[in-house]
Amino acid sequence: MAEADFADLVYEAEQLATEIVGTRELPRIERTLKQVLEASQALWSKVTATGAQDIQANLLLGTKGLDLPQVKQKLETLSSRRTFEPLDPVPITDIQSFLKNESENAILQLIESTHQTTFNHIGNLHYSKMFEEWQEHKTNLMNSLLGYSKQIVDIPTRRETIVNETLFGTRSVLDQEEMAYIRHFTEYNNAILQGLPRTNLLEKFASAADDFNNQKLSDMWKMLTFMCQLPPQGKVNVLEARSQPHVQEKMIQQALAYLELRYKEYMEVIVSGNLRSARRGGSPGTIPLVKGFINVRQIANEPGLDDEIVEGSPLWPLVFYCLRCGDVPAAIQCMKADPSKEELVAILEDLRDSPQRKINMRAEMQLRSVYRRTIRSSPDPYKRAVYCLLGACDVHDDHRSICKTADDYLWLKLWQLREEEAEPVPDRICYSFLQNLVLEDYGEQYYKANEQPNVYFQLLVLTGQWESAIDFLIRVDKYRSHAVHMAIAIHETNLLALPASINAPLLVIDEADKAPMRRLNLLRLVLLYTKKFENSDPKEILHYFFALRNLQGKEDDMNAFATCVINHVMETKQYDLILGTLEQDGCRHPGLLDAFEGNSINVKSITEAIAQTAESRGLLEDAIKLYDLCGAHEKVLSLLNALLSQVLARSSNEPGSLRNRLVKVANELNSRYAGEDVNCKASTFTTFKMLRNFITFFDMYHFKEFNKALDVIMSTRVIPMNVDEMEDRINNFRLLEDTISKNIPDILLAVMNIYYHQYQQIQGDIKNMSASMLEDSNKSKHLSFIRERARLLTSFAGTIPYRMPGDTNSRLVQLEIGMT
């Protein structure tokens, strides 16, 4: 083939160009081959990806019966916000359209604002509900713990003793110490119930603790008795009353008196044990005692003491320990031995004559000035300590060289306390500062409370933090029962701070209270303590609940005693023992609760509340018994009627079955109510009587005593026995209560079965008789009589205003047809 020349190639190119361009006037797009390739690849990747997704979507939706193209088309036509979009503005000149547009826009804005408000309200409700549930959950978690320890969730049972027997023959789980407490507590409560003068429960419990041969425990009760010797506060906010200056001053004086008395006893023990080195002689009094103590401790040989000597002993240790014993006159006598101490003698005399054991402000400023100038640099620690005591100087100096124990430290700080100022003063400490120092700054870890709980307890008690002290003590196994009785005793003196809600945790920090004060939930503490012997010692538990009689219960008209009794009875089911029983003649035999009947305790109302609780929990048999005990006859018969209607047609009458129990109760009530006035509606009592008759009817029906059963059903005047009674029975049916009307299907079926059985029996007798007897017309008349009754019964079932079950109607018709 010949090669084409250049002209031929040009011609062919022009022909191709003409074919491509054609005759249409279309825009030409000039692209390079590279651009065409890239565009083709992009288009191909997009088509293939979308196609794969569409295929997968079709497969997924196709399994659910959906067509993807149709769904996609419908979605494209939807507009979720089209209805609420603002309308397009219209020209102002078109007034009609303008007003329509504005009104529609106002409606849309109102709908939108309402939607937003509703959404926000629902959100707030949801948040509040979640917060409330979380708070309740946190409270439940906290309530499952005692204080801060996880080791006291399960309260262990203390050792049992054979001699601890209750009045009811069951062995008590209380140990000897707990039995001693409850004996004194029972005597105290009985005196209150009998209207006798009220004794001091703190002293009663303290005397009981003295018999336990535990000196540390006796000291705890002794210091608590000291601290609670405060003026009566009445029914006011306890923490506010204890924050009053005169009350705090009294608490400080009581704490000082206890610490000084205890130290004096300690000095006497030391001196008595070292008579030879003490060289006390036979002189009584504080000064010989202090001199003997100084000799035993060889304080005169300590370095840095001043050279001032009084009766052979260094002056400042003598004065310091006289003050440590609380004997200010003895300290004055020592000071008078040195003529150069006239100013200090005057200050001490002022201190002696002051009821608050405080010197005047002028003397205090004078002492501080002297301390800053000369005494602070003195090497004698006792001299510095005396000045710091009297003038509250250098309050942050702990004087560790002579105040070596927690008692000494607390005694020193109590001496230095001053009234709280509106603004903090750097060189003064107040009562709340000392409380916070003991509880928060130092705390349990610093004082090694686990190793020596009595020391930390003492610091809390002597600083007026009784709630925190008891909360700490109940976490110590061996002191738990003692802490509970301490709380009860303090509460009886109206000095225990309680939370506003009985559902609060054991220890409560109220933001409204002054720091670091706490509130103790006495009700929860008593419930935790009594949990272990709630089944073995019911009488003792009621005495502990009696301590809560002045607290508000869950209901406004009920105190905490009633609330606890209700919960306890529902838990233990000791109805007869606690609430009493009814004799056959209607006389009530009192229970343990009757011993507490008084102004704020009503046994009948508590019994009724327990009955209501049992009813709400579905314990209807218990509720019937309890309502009967408190004389609520209407509730007794209403509940019993409801239960009897459920078991009326049952054939089971075995001993212990529900039907047997209910029938027994019904018979007892019927015999008892027959001789007394029943406080209930006439219709309720009539229904009760009819239900008893129907019970008798079904009993005879199941025993196949059909003639007696028909006699009983005739006496109820519910089922028509002849045509004349039809209208009267239909009218009577409208007056029946639901407890009877809902059993009508079973009653009709039972009566129809009796008719059918009688019909078959007579018909069988006719077939078995001889030919001469078959002619007897009496048998035929009897059969006709039974058929007439059966038809009447079927007609009655279709006429009464009651929707009869379909199977009942069909069964009645079948039995009637069987008698034709």
Image: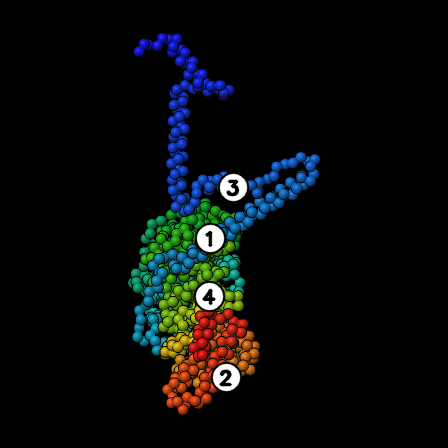
Question: Which residue corresponds to mark 3?
Answer: 78
Q: Amino acid at mark 1?
A: Met
Front label number (4 vs 3): 3
Among numbered discs 4 and 3, the one appearing first in the sequence: 3
Cα–Cα span, label 4 and label 3: 72 Å
Residue 28, visible in the rendered structure:
yes
Among numbered discs 2 and 4, the one appearing first in the sequence: 4
Q: Amino acid at mark 3?
A: Leu
Question: Which residue corresponds to mark 1?
Answer: 130
Which residue is found at the position 57% from the left and 43% from the top?
83
Mark 2 lies on a secondary structure that is helix
Which residue is found at the position 40% from the left and 80% from the top?
702
Q: Amino acid at mark 2?
A: Ser
Which residue is found at the position 40% from the left and 57% from the top?
141
Mark 4 lies on a secondary structure that is helix
Mark 3 lies on a secondary structure that is loop
Q: Position of residue 425 (x, y in %)?
A: 50, 48
Comparing 64 with 332, the one in front is 64
Q: Amino acid at mark 4?
A: His
Instruction: Residue at the far bottom: name it.
Output: 772
Comparing 670 with 602, the one in front is 670
Question: Which residue corresponds to mark 4?
Answer: 491
Answer above or below: position of 14 versus 37.
above
Question: Which residue corresponds to mark 2?
Answer: 715
